[in-house]
Amino acid sequence: MAADRIRTRTISAAAWGVLLLCLWLWSRGLGEDAQDNAGAQNAFTAAQVLQGPAPKAAKPLNPAGPQGVEVKSIGVQAVVSKRGLDKSGAVDPPPFGSANEVGWYQGGATPGAAGAAIMVGHVDTRSKPAVFYRLHDIRPGEKIRVNRADGTAAVFTVERVETFDKESFNADRVYGPHKKGRAELRLITCGGEYQPLEKAYTGNLVVSAYLTGTSP
């Protein structure tokens, strides 16, 4: 068991470096075909943080892969696919045309288990909005539900919403747990301003949440 924990920490540390590169490449790849979506990218330039008494963190669940994710406040109800790394060493995102698919990085934590589970999704496609088109509208305190393969549904409370420029991307803050022992979740998409000449967004929008309960 101790050996497994050491191996997990080693994999996680290595994965952060890979993911830092992958998110940069991934968002550039999206921008190459994306429509000019500046209006939808009204992302926060400063962190929006949960205020007042915070809901108590729930005890982490046993590991189980995600099957779907729901965010009622922004109209998201999406399927989740397992994603690994591509030949270049970057996380392989959902297919560009899959407008309603979220990718879960299966090299990290499962949603609801201890650690930070990473989910990524496109903001738009060539012709229409994609699953995380309205992710910039989410607010601290709102709920995210992840339906898991073991029949449980993990409910997360949004704690922080922020945009990171590619030049100042903080891998530890994005991919690492904010508090030891918690089950946490990150929803990530392209953020900042869309630059037509470079066909890329200037950063990544990151929603951080933590497990506060379960539901049927």
Image (spheres, rainbow, N blue to C red):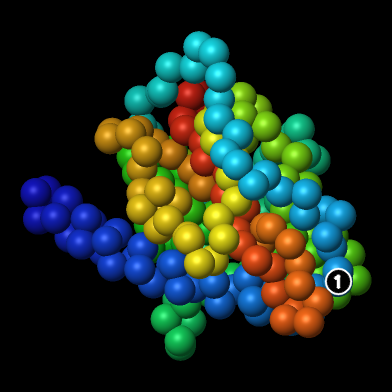
Residue placed furthest toward the top:
53
| Quarter the C terminus occupies | top right
Give the labeled residue for mark 1.
Answer: 35
Q: Is residue 147 visible?
A: no
Q: Position of residue 132 (x, y in %)?
A: 72, 53
Q: Residue at x 41, y 23 (%)?
A: 57
For image coordinates 29% across by 59% down, the residue present is 12
Tell me, yes or no, if residue 74 can be seen here. yes
The percent position of residue 23, horizontal first and vertical second, equals 53, 68
Q: Amino acid at mark 1?
A: Gln
- Label 1 Cα neighbours within 10 Å, binned few <14 / some 14-19 / many ≥20: some
Q: Of all residues shown, which one is farthest toward the left?
A: 2
| Secondary structure type for disc 1 | loop
Residue at image location 63% in from the left, 71% down from the top = 27
Query: Is 27 situated left or right of 104 in this image?
Result: right
Q: Is residue 76 left or right of residue 8?
A: right
Quadrant assignment, res 147: top right
Figure label count: 1
Residue 199 falls in image quadrant: bottom right
Residue 146 is situated, as x and y percent measured from the top left of the image, at: 57, 40
Residue in the foreground of this view, choosing between 95 and 73: 73
Residue 115 % position (x, y): 35, 44
Depth check: give the residue in front, 29 or 73.
29
* Residue farthest along the bottom direction in this orientation: 87
Q: Is residue 153 above or below residue 18?
A: above
> Which residue: 49% across, 17% down?
54
